[in-house]
Amino acid sequence: MRAFIQFSLLVVVCPAVFFTISCASLPFFNKEAGDKKESVPSGPFFEEGFDGRDIRLAVLEPEGVNLDENEKYLLSFIQGSLTTNFNRFSRITLHDRQNLDKILAEQNLSASGYFSENDYVRMGELVNVQFFATGKLIKMSSGEFSLDLQIVDPSTGKRIHSYEKNLILSKDIRNGSAVRLACSSFLTDLGVVLTEAGRLALEGEQTLQNEAELDLAKGIEAGKSGNFVESLHFLNKGAESRDGTGEASTRLQLLSAEFTDGGVGAAIVRDVEEREVWLKRMNEFENFYYDHPPFDIVYTSRPVQRGKTNYNAQNGAAADFEFKISLRQTNDVKVMQKVLNVINKGLANSRKQDDWGFANWPLISASSTQKTSIPTKVFDRYRTFKVTMGLFNTNQDTPIAAVEVDMHGQLAYINNKIGADSSQDLKVLFSDVPVFRIDATDTLVIKVVSIDNTPVDQFEENNLLGITVVPKRLPWKQRPGIPAKHRLIPQNAPEKKEAANDTKPEKRADSAPDKPNKKEKMPLDYRIGISGVNLANPSNFDTMEFYADVAIGIKHLTFEGLIFKPWGANPFESIFNWEQPMDFGFGFGLGWALIWRNALATLEAGYIQYRFYDESSIHIPFTQFKLDIMPWKLGLGFRLGYMIEAGIPDNGWEYGLYFDKNSTFGNDNLRFKGKFMSGIVLWL
């Protein structure tokens, strides 16, 4: 029994670890195409004794000049990014930003980022720091930015260190690279000596940390503007980030408490005013998530030629190019659920939800009246995003061909839970692309040109819809989060084709069905599987076997080929013991499978031939039940099951040996042998 338990663990755990490690580097192993990996240099980031431990510093929000309304969060982002990097790459004592904001508000000091010399002197006395970091972010008429930062001595109000850089691209502000260069310069000015590892880490890419800072900054700015739903959304995202600083969580708790106490401010004393505030919050929720749907457009950037070049095309030689595109729900669905939970909890605590007419929200819009019932524009309908894709030479900004693709996304609210469906993976053609337009010295690439007739740059900057680019293969298809009877998205949408001699895309109808979809292909509907399993008869552990199979499954039908190798009670000693009477077995099975989420249950019957070393053999039927559980999208999982073999002992000495009474049950004419199985399986 002990040997069986030890070996069962070995069979299950070791191959699972091997497959996990081996497949981690494969493109399809990543759950999302957008998984980000950062290589952080190892070693200390600064020299001991030159780490700034005696310095006390407060980072102020810089002044913004000529910024658009949707760019003001960059000021809070610069403040947070400087604070985070000063803290990470030195031992400078930094003043807490939330406490600093409170002091400035109490003293009625400037909230615009502009301070006079007297203001610096006054603030220095209040917060007890040696230096302030502050400055300006200026947007120029060209659309580029100028960053002018400074270190100020509050004892005099004078600037002692400066950093200025002009003609900064918008993306270099948003990805934090411009701010990190400024931080590196200031650390040197303040006497902090970075190691080579520290310099590379500071000035290199910090994708995860940067995204956390951006979400926090957007949440702070939305709160200043009174957009509490937007603030809740981005603070939730910042709090969930693995590289968050903790500030987002603190701010989120404070903002959530304001919602969930049932009231929305001590100054509101009248019922009508309180209802109006809740109405505003609910309308904010509907409008924000309509404008910021939790979906990403995912597409392959490298076109593949389909078919042969047409040398007799009207405008000379032409070729067809194909790419793949999909719409995928993002983690923002979970964030949306958290925001909705906060609002619902606050409404419930108010105990006036029914009286105010909000009992059916969020399925019925908060703007509805007793006479009119208006469905929400967020739930229980699908949206169509008209995505214009372009085929480009990489050294050109004008597409040589264009095509419009309709992508559909649906959100549903069922049993107090938000579900999402965006289950289309399309193959799209650029047809008849004139060869003379293709630069022979360049590489073709596919890009998003516009979404709903809005240039893609505006969509990305305003976070209206995410875009993820993968080189060749779409990530593993997502399972819909909406029950089949509630799904409204049209399935099997036709491929879009566009004559490439006109880069203006042709619009094509893509009508919705009158009824919801009946059924959708599950992830395991078409599958190829490989497994390794240990078989053990509980009556006699001397008969343990190794069992491997290769299986093909189409929906409910499964066919597999089997091979068996006996290895006795102690596999480590018996596996190479060639003096055992039975050599190996092989066979096949045919079964019926039921699929539920990431689980596969199979009832199977088949035939096995066991061969002995004297070249004799036995032929026996079997039936087995298998349960495969796959927690990973790759298809790697665990298998448990039970097999029963049947035989007649009187058919020969081989049958009598295999169906001996110590390890089987039944009568003298027909015996059965039962075997428990445990192991691993990989479904692809």
Image (cartoon, rainbow, N blue to C red):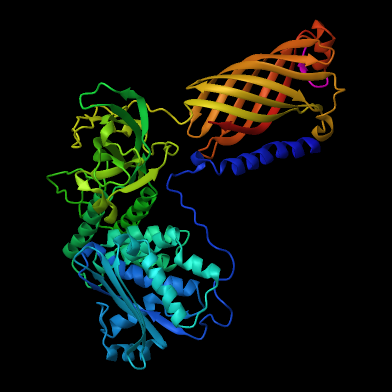
Q: Residue at x 35, y 70 (%)?
A: 78
Front residue of 675/637: it is: 637
Image coordinates of residue 277 in percent, x first then y, are 21, 62
| Residue 665 on the magenta span | yes
Would you identify the image quadrant in which residue 163 lies?
bottom left
Q: What stretch is highlighted in magenta?
A: 662-667
Q: Residue at x 82, y 33 (%)?
A: 570
Q: Which residue is drawn at 50% across and 34% down?
A: 598
Res 183 visible: yes
| Residue 548 on the magenta span | no
Quadrant showing the N terminus: top right
Q: Can you name the residue that lies furthest to the bottom here?
A: 156
Front residue of 50/416: it is: 50
Q: Can you name the residue that lies furthest to the left here?
A: 371
226 w.r.t. 634: above or below: below
Does residue 299 appear left or right of residue 676 in this picture? left
Res 493 visible: no
Image coordinates of residue 37 in percent, x first then y, are 49, 53
Would you identify the image quadrant in which residue 213 lies?
bottom left
Query: What secondary structure is the magenta-colored segment mainly?
Result: loop
Image coordinates of residue 80 in percent, x first then y, are 38, 70
Image coordinates of residue 642 in percent, x first then y, are 66, 25
Does residue 76 appear left or right of residue 504 in this picture? right
Total tally of numbered discs in the picture: 0
